[in-house]
Amino acid sequence: MPGQGDELRETVRERYAAAAVAVAGGGTAEDCCGGSDCCATGTIDIDENFGASLYGAADRDQLPIQAVAASLGCGNPTAVADLREGDVVLDLGSGGGIDVMLSARRVGPTGKAYGVDMTDEMLALARENTAKAGVTNAEFLKGTIESIPLPDNTIDVVISNCVINLSTDKPAVFAEMARVLTPGGRIGIADVIAEDALTPAERAQRGDYVGCIAGALSFTEYRNHLEAAGFADIQIEPTHPVADGMHSAIIKAVKPTHPTCCAPDCCQPS
């Protein structure tokens, strides 16, 4: 019997599938993180807090219009992820493929960019966009961000754009990020985060789950989850407000080269 988490995931999938269909049909997708219902109709309201407006013209102009139109995020993680030639990058919740394509071009022919998404319609749109852009070092995989379909220790950089707040099992997402990253690997994520004073009920009053608001973690919760998954050098910097007491933020962290000491006496001198 499906639980509330399964129902929320299906609601998210339906909303983003509708956005992909709208774009593939020649329309534009509402930036679903804005929380309106027009993903189902293909209309768009320009919102400076979400979507393609958060990318520079140089980034937008090098991509197919469908990739730009399908941009649903709250930031530009590729601008802060410190991508290097030859890196292997993974985008969680890759949508129409904008961040995967930008990453693939930045890591060059010796690198690679993966995108993981659970929505068939978005995967089809992303693959079409990638082909139009002539990007050959990108690959899109069907899966969930709570169970990433890639081996351990294979990714140099994990990025994500306004997607982790949509997960109904966030500890699993952070654990999976740590699993697939190589030792010394890093994350560069854009996400919506709540001020610590806001309760979950107060967050829900400011927007719904599929609108990237109700499911957002607080600053302290985000840091605690990253620490519990083993990340170090955690930086969480708000960039702009998206609702009362809610902010888009850039999150950076590193997977340590050596595992953190967990046993009670393992770090004590002999």
Image (cartoon, rainbow, N blue to C red):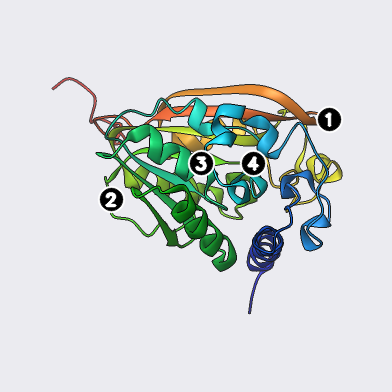
Residue 259, x across and y down, in percent: 27, 34
Element under label 4? loop
| Amino acid type indicated by mark 4 | Gly
Amino acid beneath label 3: Asp
Distance in Å between CA atoms under marks 3 and 2: 22 Å
Disc number placed over residue 244 in the picture, else none:
1
Which residue position is annotated with label 2?
152
Between the C-alphas of marks 2 and 4, the distance is 27 Å
- Asked if 4 appears above or below 218 in the picture, the reply is below
Q: Position of residue 235 (x, y in %)?
A: 51, 22
Mark 4 surroundings within 10 Å by alpha-carbon count, few (fewer than 14), some (14 through 19), many (20 or more): many
Count of all numbered marks drawn on residues in the image: 4
The answer to whether 156 appears left or right of 217 in the picture is left
Decide which of tag 3 and tag 2 comes sooner along the chain. Answer: 3
Query: Which three-letter amino acid code belongs to the residue tagged 2?
Result: Asp
Q: Amino acid at mark 1?
A: Asp
Find the residue positioned furthest to the right: 205
Q: Are marks 3 and 4 in contact (CB under 8 Å)?
A: yes
State which mark lies toward you, 3 or 2.
3
Q: Is residue 8 above or below residue 94?
A: below
Lower sequence index among marks 1 and 4: 4
Marker disc for residue 73: 4
- Point 75% across, 46% down: residue: 214
